[in-house]
Amino acid sequence: MKEIKIGFIQQQNTAVPEDNMQRLSKGIADLAKQGAQLIVLQELHNSLYFCQVEDVNNFDWAEPIPGPSTQFYGHLAKQFGVVIVTSLFEKRAPGLYHNTAVVIESDGTIAGKYRKMHIPDDPAYYEKFYFTPGDLGFHPITTSVGKLGVLVCWDQWYPEAARLMALQGADLLIYPTAIGYESSDTPDEQERQREAWTTIMRGHAVANGLPVVAINRVGLEPDPSGNTQGIRFWGSSFVAGPQGELLYCASNSDEENVIVPVDLQHSEQVRRWWPFLRDRRIDEYGNIVRRFID
């Protein structure tokens, strides 16, 4: 058995970044003291989900990498000897911004980063206004706890991204996320959306024989424009094993700091039983890179 203790923080954010960061700091300390080796934070965890509106003033929230946040979380990683997956609003250059996951090694250094590749533009999720699509490709980040296939939120709907991470030796797939209901959706529609979100990533676990970690925020965040009733983030952060089995699923309404032990060696056994990588017909997949086959 090659067990890793994965901690995650499902948090309801406020409009004050310093408050969010201090509560995350306390959560990281608590999880580390309980034995966590890897701690995963939710998407854009320092702030409210500002993409509900298009406002040029929100670019003021962006920061360089390395920068203040990588220094803040780097200090915590080194202090507690843990690997931390963060999610930041990156200012690459004036007028050029990314939604970027940064992995901090347990010695406080930056192990690597991933810039979100798939950028949504839906009502209340106006991310194309803020984020340039990533240009770093899909590559696992090597750390002291394994090779982390880090992707971000909207990437979770694309099996190609998960597959490319798996084909490069990722030990697990990680999805920092910010997703929720539009408050006017019916209860049935809300449940369908949340179940689809869980199901697609559990499918990535099965198809690739890898554990999946998905971390979401929780709570209602009002729409600053008043055009909608805001987003109620549905939480439900989870860890799934390589057969898609749920090892833990968090509340859909409450904050949680949780540690989930995961046996990374089990992935090899599952891949021996279900050798999907062996049976791929790579000679017949050429058209997959086309937008549509017509």
Image (cartoon, rainbow, N blue to C red):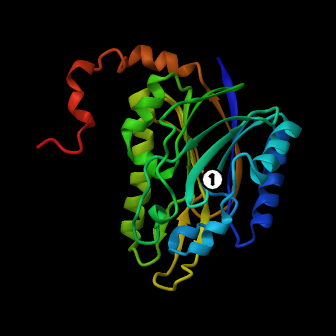
Q: Position of residue 246 (x, y in %)?
A: 52, 40
Residue that badge 1 annotates: 42
Compared with 167, 236 (above or below) is below
User: Residue 24: where, in percent of width, then height?
Assistant: 77, 55
Residue ID at (58%, 18%): 265
Between 181 and 116, the one lying in front of the other is 116
Work out which residue is located at the far right of the displayed protein and give it: 79
Disc 1 residue type (three-letter): Gln
Q: Secondary structure at mark 1?
A: loop
Q: Is residue 106 visible?
A: yes
Q: Quadrant of the C terminus?
A: top left
Q: Where's residue 27, x and y in %? A: 79, 52
Viewport quadrant of the N terminus? top right
Whether residue 236 is visible: no
Q: Which residue ends up furthest to the front in the rendered image? A: 94
> Percent x, y for residue 34?
82, 39
Residue at image coords 23%, 39%: 290
Pick the residue in front: 274 or 146. Answer: 146
**Which residue occupies the extreme left position in the image?**
294
Write down the quadrant of residue 107 in the picture: top right
Task: Locate residue 216 relative to residue 286 in the image: left or right.
Answer: right
Query: Position of 290 compared to 179: left or right?
Result: left
Q: How many marks?
A: 1
**Looking at the image, which is closer to me, 6 or 68?**
68
Q: Residues within 10 Å of mark 1 (few under 14, many from 20)?
A: many
Quadrant of residue 101 within the rendered picture = top right
